[in-house]
Amino acid sequence: MTVADVSLDRLVDWLTRFRALVTENQGYLTELDSAIGDADHGSNMARGMNAVIDKLGEPQTVDALFKTVGMTLVSSVGGASGPLYGTFFLRIGTTAGAVDSLDGATLSAGLRAGFDGVISRGKAEPGDKTMVDAMGPALDALDASLGSGSDPAAAAAAAFEAAQRGRDATEPLVARKGRASYLGERSAGHLDPGATSTAFLFQALAEALA
Amino acid sequence: MIGIVVVSHSPALADAAVALALEMVAGAPPPIAVAAGAGDGVVGTDAIAVAAAIDEVASPDGVLVFMDLGSAVLSASMALEFTATDVEVRLSDAPFVEGVVAGIVLAAAGATLDDAAREASSAMTAKNAQLESAPPADPQTPAPVVDGAVTAEATIVNDVGLHARPASVIVAKMAEFDARVQIADADDPTRSAPAGSLLALMGLGLGKGTRLRISGTGPDAAAAVEWVRATTADGYGE
């Protein structure tokens, strides 16, 4: 294995770490969501990722892995994060195809397709105070890092940095999508729960590829 | 008959909306499937369950899907990727309760997917018209009486007036005629609605003692207008 390869095991490790992060921070995510939403993001994500890890089995290809992940999320999360994260993972799988590892370019292409799926599913734009505000900058940083010759591990670390900045930048925003948009101006002054869980997603990726 | 799918965060909410609609269905109801809750009592929606509900009621006439809010809309749009059926499936932008009522009543009356979807979508117009903040009348609404129309008058005699059940009976019956029939308050012709539009008729709130002006155009206009006149004079069978 070269340093450029992202094996199936590492992708499973990514999901396992993401499960651990959303489970450990379940109360925190729900607390954020209780300020501007319906107080279920933490419990929804923890339930969804626990179901994912239970169902993973031993996938042989990247598309099989992410199909299981996506289908499990859409049927077990309950809230809007189900179809959104579900679409994200399903698109990664269909873009990657029946391969047993990814390199920097195919990882980037998969994540980018997943992001496009989230946008087309949720119709959110940058600045709407959603997961898009963390995911967009993360993928831009990942691509910039890969473009300058970094390996996937370094690129994922850069993506995590950018996701955190994107997450933090949602705090002053007024929500324009989702339950939080009903609050109008009162949604300002709180971190967006979806952007926060997306930062955990990239933290998990950075740790899994390190 | 088109199939109806009801998507909600809450099974209780979905079941209650369906029950409300079925109160107004006299004959056989359309195929109805509920996809509500995320399992184990969790408030939420499940795209896989929505897809299964669509497949369950799929008919050659199509399927009309009503959603409450937020993730219900996302799950329903995602479900279209997972359905097995190849019949036409339409996601309605109607407000939930009004949409479910209009969709089920019209489906039972044999409405096409286009007609049921359009009527459900116009639900907010009917509700706005009931409130003082009513927007200007829809320019698409035909004038109460047009040149060459067949007209008749009748006075509402039943105690509760032209409420939901009589309106649904009229709407169902109108589907049998090749005619455009309009029902108006004869003393205030601005209060007027197409006889084929459930929510618009209900929105007029025509009470006991109101004199109706019924007008129609088209090949079956005479028969259709006479039927409305007679059933009104008869107290809508109540």
Image (tube, coloured by chain):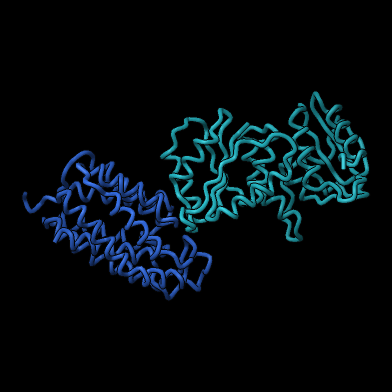
Chain colours: A blue, B cyan
Q: Position of residue A33 (x, y in %)?
A: 43, 68
Say which quarter of the image contains residue B13: bottom right
Q: Quadrant of the N terminus of chain B?
A: top right
Q: Give left or right: position of B178 versus A171.
A: right
Q: Residue furthest bottom?
A: A189
Q: Position of residue B166 (x, y in %)?
A: 81, 42
Q: Position of residue B138 (x, y in %)?
A: 71, 47
Reply above or below: B44 against B99: below
In this orientation, which residue lies closer to the viewer: A84 or A158? Answer: A84
Residue at x 57% of width, y 46% of height: B6
In this orientation, which residue lies closer to the viewer: B50 or A88? Answer: B50
Q: Give left or right: position of A63 versus B39.
A: left
Q: Quadrant of the C terminus of chain B?
A: top right
In this orientation, which residue lies closer to the viewer: A120 or B38? Answer: B38
Residue at x 77% of width, y 47% of height: B164
In this orientation, which residue lies closer to the viewer: A174 or A36? Answer: A36
Q: Residue furthest front?
A: B40
Say which quarter of the image contains residue B180: top right
Q: Position of residue B43 (x, y in %)?
A: 50, 58
